[in-house]
Amino acid sequence: EGADGVVVVQGTDTLEETAYFFELTWASEAPIVITGAMRNPSLPSADGAGNLLAALTVAADPRSRGRGSLVAFNDDVHAGRWVRKAHSSHVEAFSSNPAGPLALVSEGLVHYFHPVAVRPAALPLENADFSGLVPIVESGVEDTGELLETLVKAGVKGVVLAANGAGHVSAGSADVIERVLPEVPVVVAGRTGAGPTFRGTYGFRGSESDLIAMGATMAGWLDPRKSRLLLHTLLATGASRDRVEAEFRLRGDLA
């Protein structure tokens, strides 16, 4: 309350997930900026101090207000909506494919490339119950859907499929999805790391059109990890199937 901004420092393995969770739930106009380090202080070219200074600079800049969750890393500023860890060891480990960074920190100044965008309303967390699992299941060659069916029988709250291509699964998986959809919501995200799920290009068994007709929700531009966070947060707050569909349309599509 009353701060110009907030800086969060954490390990980088799950930093993108923290950033997106804040993107979903951060209601303040003050920015929340997440950063970390790829090299610890004992290594040559340690990056922690520089990243922290950049994050503080971004958080204090008045032009950061209204931008929600941001990640400051290697002098780039990424939106929590897009950022992902794209390399296991490089100092430039974070990217925002396909949108690109929002800004660059140079000579102690933040240079924004894009105006402040309209953000969806923050999801309320009052009385939220995050108990229960919302796993990610990855599709692949000769996938039969048995793992998905086993997870649903075990009592998961919902499932995110990391699907092939633009949101496709095998015919066997499609049969299982059709059986389990009355029990749990199924969100279909692309496993490629870039690009959206389709909505009406293909019509074969297990295609995006087939899955939508069954009642599955397409994730749009959200990757599987972000889709899991959104679905789990919605289910934790008691969202209906219609609300889940509407929120993924709102936050996953660009149209």
Image: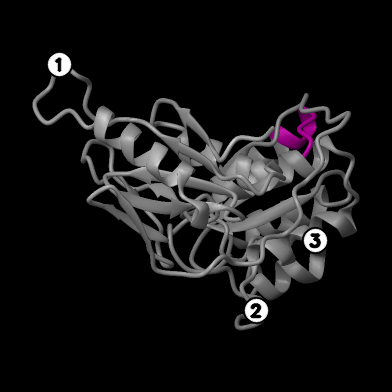
Q: Compare residues 130 and 30 and report the one nearer the observer.
A: 30
Q: Compare residues 206 and 90 and report the one nearer the observer.
A: 90
Dots 3, 1 in contact, CB < 8 A: no
Q: Earlier in the sequence, mark 2 or mark 1?
A: 1
Residue annotated with mark 3: 245
100 on left or right of 80? left
Q: Position of residue 137 (x, y in %)?
A: 58, 43
Q: Which mark is residue 42?
A: 1
Element type at mark 3: helix
Name the amino acid, label 1: Ser
Q: Eyeballing the image, is 198 above or below 104?
A: below
- Boundaries of the magenta span: 151-159
Q: Which mark is residue 255?
A: 2
Judge whether residue 185 is colored magenta: no
Q: Nearer the viewer, mark 3 or mark 2?
A: 2
Judge whether residue 154 is colored magenta: yes
- 3D distance between C-alphas at marks 2 and 1: 47 Å
Q: Nearer the viewer, mark 2 or mark 1?
A: 1
Q: Residue at x 25, y 46 (%)?
A: 92
- 3D distance between C-alphas at marks 3 and 2: 15 Å
Element type at mark 1: loop
Q: Residue at x 70, y 75 (%)?
A: 209
Element type at mark 2: loop
Q: Eyeballing the image, is 45 above or below 244?
A: above
